[in-house]
């Protein structure tokens, strides 16, 4: 059978398998102790005060817009070069998605196009902005926070590509994605193609205690077991008019319309085990990126690429070329399954149905014509990477 080199791949070790097996033999398959452990260790990894584990990255986005009170008619800004979920969460709340074009050098939401949108509408029109740390490059949230404060916006950072990434702020300090200093909420995904695999899984990090409590409730039907928050009186809760001494042990209250977006203990055990190797994984991804960068820096057929940065988390390694379709097919024939990230979100038929059309975001559309994501995962061998690089050079020469 021909060897396949995919664009991304999970890495499962014996330690991962043992961690999951241990949960299977324990008393709790879900709602047990692994969840809080995973949350605490993940918060420590990104440097935030709180973390809430949820069933996937999309659920993380959905609960985030809910916790921030997004309502029908509100408007939220995001980038067209992202996975559809970054925009879809806004639609779940019946609010309107407004795209802003990308910066052609970083492929990230261009702060100047965001500024233009904000300046051209009455203050209060936009409620929030969802920047995406596309490919694993961290958005400069310091600048975006200033703009957001000026226009009274919240920020949900979609860091699904970027656990372990950072940017350098104006005081030369390193700011890790999800540390809660600039974004109100940051979301992560644990889908197997991402840095940390849980099968399915997501996390929301924040430094805001109120948002944390709200998310914890929304994750589990809007129900709380926290006695100080109870609204009904003890008599009603106990089922006898005069009531007992306090609320009965079984009692809980539903305060708002939440969901079942919980993550299981089996998935959290896998996530915990993977998290312990996350730093090594990011370091290996940076090594791979450096090799690609050096191979492509002086090649004329490469019109743009994910330039090396030691702060980038390299979920993806993107190059821009002419004749992308030809290269894609040539690589596929040779077993190299490169991938395209992303078809611009505003051109998805669903968003076209909401009024977007070709030509609306020319930089994103130009990027889409030329982008291709090369194999990038910690277990990619040096020989396989060399084969990928040589295949690309061969195709163009
Ligand atoms: C993967 C991803 C999501 C959604 O995560 P799921 O866990 O698959 O629901 C959201 N945004 C971006 C940018 C992603 O890459």
Image (cartoon, helix red, strand yellow):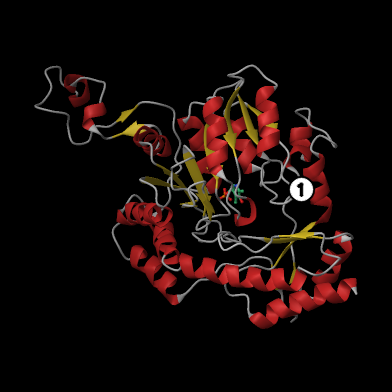
State which quadrant residue 9 falls in.
Answer: bottom right
Which residue in the structure is indicated by mark 1? Answer: 343
Relative side of 151 to 120, left or right? left
- Residue 3 visible in the displayed image: no
Q: Height in image: 310 above or below 140?
A: below
Q: Height in image: 23 above or below 79?
A: below
Relative side of 139 to 42, left or right? right
Relative side of 240 to 396, left or right? left
The percent coordinates of residue 95 (x first, y second) are 61, 26
State which quadrant residue 208 falls in.
Answer: top left
Q: How many marks?
A: 1
The percent coordinates of residue 331 (x first, y second) are 81, 71
Indicate the secondary structure of the residue bearing disc 1: loop
Q: Height in image: 323 above or below 141?
A: below
Q: Residue furthest left?
A: 245
Quarter in which the N terminus is drawn: bottom right
Residue appearing at x 25%, y 20% in the figure? 232
Q: Residue furthest front?
A: 171
Label 1 CB-ligand 1 distance < 8 A: no
- Residue 221 visible in the displayed image: yes
The percent coordinates of residue 360 (x first, y second) are 81, 34
The percent coordinates of residue 237 (x first, y second) are 21, 24
Disc 1 residue crowd, few under 14, some 14–19, many 20+, Cα 10 Å: some
Quarter in which the C terminus is drawn: bottom right
Residue appearing at x 79%, y 33% in the figure? 352
Between residue 167 and residue 71, name the one nearer to us. 167
Between residue 34 and residue 99, name the one nearer to us. 99
């Amino acid at each position: 059978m021909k060897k396949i080199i995919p664009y991304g791949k999970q890495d499962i070790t014996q330690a991962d398998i043992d961690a999951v097996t241990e949960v299977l033999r324990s008393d709790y398959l879900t709602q047990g102790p692994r969840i809080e452990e995973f949350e605490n260790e993940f918060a420590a990894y990104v440097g935030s005060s709180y973390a809430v584990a949820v069933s996937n990255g999309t659920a993380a986005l959905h609960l985030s817009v809910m916790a921030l009170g997004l309502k029908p008619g509100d408007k939220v800004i995001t980038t067209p070069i992202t996975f559809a979920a970054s925009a879809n969460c806004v639609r779940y709340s019946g609010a309107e998605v407004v795209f802003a074009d990308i910066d052609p050098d970083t492929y990230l939401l261009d702060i100047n196009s965001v500024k233009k949108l904000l300046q051209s509408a009455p203050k209060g029109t936009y409620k929030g902005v969802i920047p995406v740390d596309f490919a694993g490059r961290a958005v400069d949230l310091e600048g975006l926070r200033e703009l957001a404060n000026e226009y009274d916006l919240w920020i949900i950072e979609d860091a699904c590509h970027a656990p372990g990434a950072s940017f350098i702020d104006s005081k030369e300090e390193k700011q890790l994605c999800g540390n809660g200093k600039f974004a109100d909420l940051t979301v992560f995904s644990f889908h197997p193609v991402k840095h940390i695999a849980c099968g399915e899984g997501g996390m929301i990090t924040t430094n805001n205690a109120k948002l944390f409590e709200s998310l914890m409730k929304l994750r589990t039907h809007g129900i709380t077991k926290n006695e100080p928050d109870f609204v009904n009186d003890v008599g009603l809760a106990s089922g006898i008019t005069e009531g007992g001494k306090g609320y009965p042990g079984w009692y809980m209250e539903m305060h708002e319309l939440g969901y079942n977006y919980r993550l299981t203990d089996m998935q959290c055990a896998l996530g915990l085990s993977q998290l312990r190797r996350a730093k090594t994984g990011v370091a290996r991804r940076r090594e791979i990126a450096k090799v690609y960068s050096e191979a492509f820096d002086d090649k004329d057929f490469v019109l743009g690429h994910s330039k090396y940065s030691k702060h980038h988390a390299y979920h993806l390694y993107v190059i821009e070329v002419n004749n992308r379709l030809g290269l894609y097919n040539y690589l596929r024939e040779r077993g190299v399954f490169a991938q395209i990230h992303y078809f611009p979100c505003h051109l998805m038929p669903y968003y076209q149905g909401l009024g977007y059309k070709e030509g609306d975001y020319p930089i994103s559309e130009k990027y889409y014509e030329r982008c291709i994501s090369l194999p990038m995962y910690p277990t990619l061998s040096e020989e396989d990477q060399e084969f990928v690089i040589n295949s690309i050079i061969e195709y163009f020469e």
